[in-house]
Image (cartoon, rainbow, N blue to C red):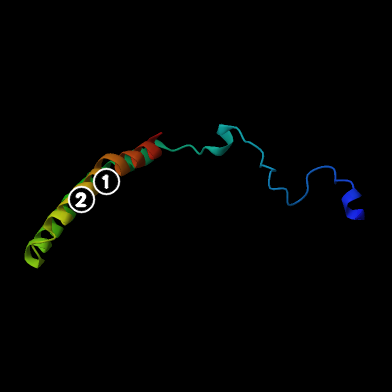
Amino acid sequence: MQYLNAAAPSGPSDNDFLASPPILPPEATETPVPPEACAAAAPLASVSSSMPLLTFLSLLIFSVFRNYKHIYHILYTCIFTYIIHKYIYLHMYIFYVCT
């Protein structure tokens, strides 16, 4: 019963999960991106935009020769993949590199 009357330690302990790291200003955490990096991302954009189309055509040809039942599933998958690559992933990558 004596441990109930013990005084609580003062100050944070080593295993205090509420302790947070110091907050740094944005200038200390951001690294500058040179303009050459944005110029290097332009050829990547043109190559990446044609890859979903090539994937779509190759899967379409494969599905025609393999099985007619799964052609719509593959079409929907390719269209969804094309939308993700073209409008979300690529633009987020360029936005991240160039800003």
Secondary element under disc 2, as helix, strand or loop, is: helix
In terms of depth relative to the viewer, which is nearer, 49 or 1?
1
Q: Earlier in the sequence, mark 1 or mark 2?
A: 2
Q: Amino acid at mark 2?
A: Pro
Q: At 38% from the left edge and 36% from the top edge, which residue is drawn? A: 98
In the image, residue 32 lies at what x, y percent? Answer: 48, 37
Looking at the image, is 65 positioned above or below residue 51? below
Marks 1/2: CA–CA distance = 7 Å
Looking at the image, is 27 positioned above or below residue 88? above
Q: Is residue 9 left or right of residue 30?
A: right
Identify residue for label 2.
52
Numbered circle sitting on residue 37: none
In the image, residue 47 lies at what x, y percent? Answer: 23, 48
Q: Residues within 10 Å of mark 2 (few under 14, many from 20)?
A: many
Q: Is residue 97 visible?
A: yes
Q: At 23% from the left edge and 43% from the top edge, which residue is drawn? A: 83
Q: Amino acid at mark 1?
A: His
Q: At 30% from the left edge and 41% from the top edge, which residue is drawn? A: 88
Q: At 85% from the left edge and 43% from the top edge, which residue is drawn? A: 10
Q: Is residue 18 left or right of residue 42?
A: right
Numbered circle sitting on residue 85: 1
Q: Quadrant of the C terminus?
A: top left
Secondary element under disc 1, as helix, strand or loop, is: helix
In the image, residue 29 lies at what x, y percent? Answer: 56, 38
List the single residue furthest toward the bottom. Answer: 66
Q: Is residue 55 left or right of residue 15?
A: left
In the image, residue 14 lies at what x, y percent? Answer: 76, 51
